[in-house]
Image (spheres, helix red, strand yellow):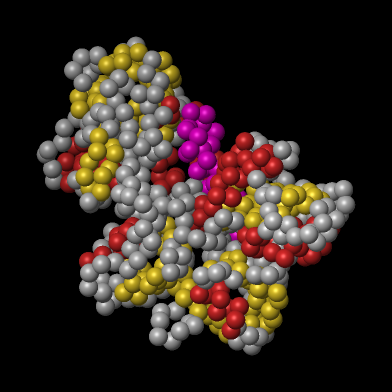
Amino acid sequence: MAKLVSVNVGLPKDVRWRGRTVRTGIWKDPVDGPCTVRRLNLDGDGQGDLAGHGGEMRAVMVYQLDSYRHWQQVLGRDDFTHGQFGENFTVEGLPDDEVCIGDRYRIGSAVFEVTQPRVTCYRVGLRMDEPRMPALLVSHRRPGFYLRVLTEGEVEAGQEIVKIADGPERMTVAETDGLLYLPERPRDRIARALRIPALSPGWQGSFRALLQQADTATEGAPAGNPGLNPDGADPRPAWDGFRPLTVAATAVESRSVLSLWLADPDGAPLPAAAPGQYLTVRLAPDADRPALLRSYSLSGPPGAQRYRISVKSEPDGVASAWLHRNLRVGDTLQTAAPRGAFILAPGDAPVVLASAGVGATPVLAMLHALAAARPGREVWWLHGARNGADHPFAAETRRLLQRLPRSHVRICYSRPRPEDRQGADYGRPGTDYTDRGRLTADLVAGLGLPADAHAHLCGPAPFMADLTAALTGAGLAPEHIRTELFAAASGLTPGIAAAGPARTPHPPGGTPGDGPAVAFTRSGITVPWRPEYGTLLELAEACDIAVRWSCRTGVCRTCETRLLEGRVAYDPEPVERPGPGNALICCSRPDRDIVLDL
């Protein structure tokens, strides 16, 4: 009979770590006497980061004394106390390789249901004073698990744990954890996990992404893990590093947008790109300064023998100004292979393509794909521009939309010219609308968009945030709304208190290194490596580049970043390496000059 050995609680507190302040509730202390268990928590307990911990499906964390004994031997330690692993219930029995998702237990007067394995993050390593701990919990198949409270009540150390129901499908905590984090992921086991009603919604979403990957896999398909990082599972790059492409033609699309057609120098067809992907180009406008790296969406028809990128001339844009003023037909651009997971959703569901300004470029490629292969699909084309002079691809989109009988159009001009005639100059009378003003969330909310639609948004960050809120308010599922932003992405540093206003990325202080060059494309800086940086993640942090991470040991894949050129070395070795052309920056360093899409 399993036994509740200790009940442990703790309120969030601030802890200093690497010069920063972490808000965490992972420090737990044993409770003397009975403790009331409620739907969201135990009395006296709390979590510092509710995005990753706590809530109804993660109300109670369980860890086993047998795992304590295992780690004492593996780590050579004898200083553990109950609650050491951040658990609420320290138990004798209930091993991860026997307890199943959906199992139900009675302890005292409360009833619980197993919902998911622990999601490991850096804070368990912080509590254990062992940075490797998140990876070790997964690789040793000893994660622990969460309980949902079905019946509130009182529990107390020393009580028996009585099993009252078996979970359907009989899938253990250890197997469930391995399906998400470890390399072997049989399709039938993923499908089986999705048949367990008790499995938490977050894990269900991850397994649905893995199942879709398994069902659409083809030769050369992405080797990433969309269950942990959807953006890390974009198709394998068609070539490594950069190769020369010739400027075959140019075209003025609007007052500020210039298109460039790029071709193979020998006239061979270029590898097909997925609609919505982008190219990264390397420019050398000044021989005395490091090359510039910029990414531009592919705006032409997918599958064409040449690539088209469309570049807006920005007032302070060194790269865009050079391309507009200096590039000529016959010139050469060093170009990385098409990349990106912001691609047209497959299937027959309605699709919303929304953009502002030059953000039309990736969704225009999607519109080309729909007009060519899916003319019967319902399409909503929503676009905002300043006026007709700044409205790129107006005639091109009109021609494409005329080939889509189930298309709907809304175009907004924020500062129309006198010659911009509302509803007359663009599209088909009675079905297309040109509105005065911005493409706002309120306007989108009133369009009657179908709730089963898949949406693709590209434009300034506030525009995408407003439209995302409008689309979710209209009933679209959040997982069906994808965005593309070519500025530096927002960071994710769970539990870390902001040290002040965000700083502009910059080279790190101290003596410059003499190792391989590390180029950050979105941040526009290149830094010579030195071993003191530790990892690429730590180098990015030293440069005040916005980064995303959670475990810092190569498990969660939150830090997965596109590696456009070069090669990295891992130490420690991650639980599973990313697909070709990607890198886990939390546990890697450059093996040669590299280019990161960061």
Measured as percent of width and height from the top left, residue 186 is found at 50, 47
- Where in the figure is residue 16, as x and y percent of width and height? 21, 45
Q: Is residue 336 magenta?
A: no
Q: Between 228 and 95, which is closer to the camera in this rendering?
A: 228
Q: Does residue 584 appear in this view?
A: yes
> Residue at 63% of width from left, 67% of height from top?
298
The residue lying toward the viewer, choosing from 524 and 309, is 524
Compared with residue 296, is residue 90 higher up or lower down, i.e. above or below? above
The span picked out in magenta is 194-220
Q: In which quarter of the image is the N terminus?
A: top left
Question: Which residue occupies the extreme front position in the image?
Answer: 418
Q: In which quarter of the image is residue 274?
A: bottom right
Q: Which quadrant of the view contains residue 327?
A: bottom right
Residue located 40% across and 85% down the image: 288
Q: Residue at x 62, y 40 (%)?
A: 470
* 393 relative to 546 in the view: left or right: right
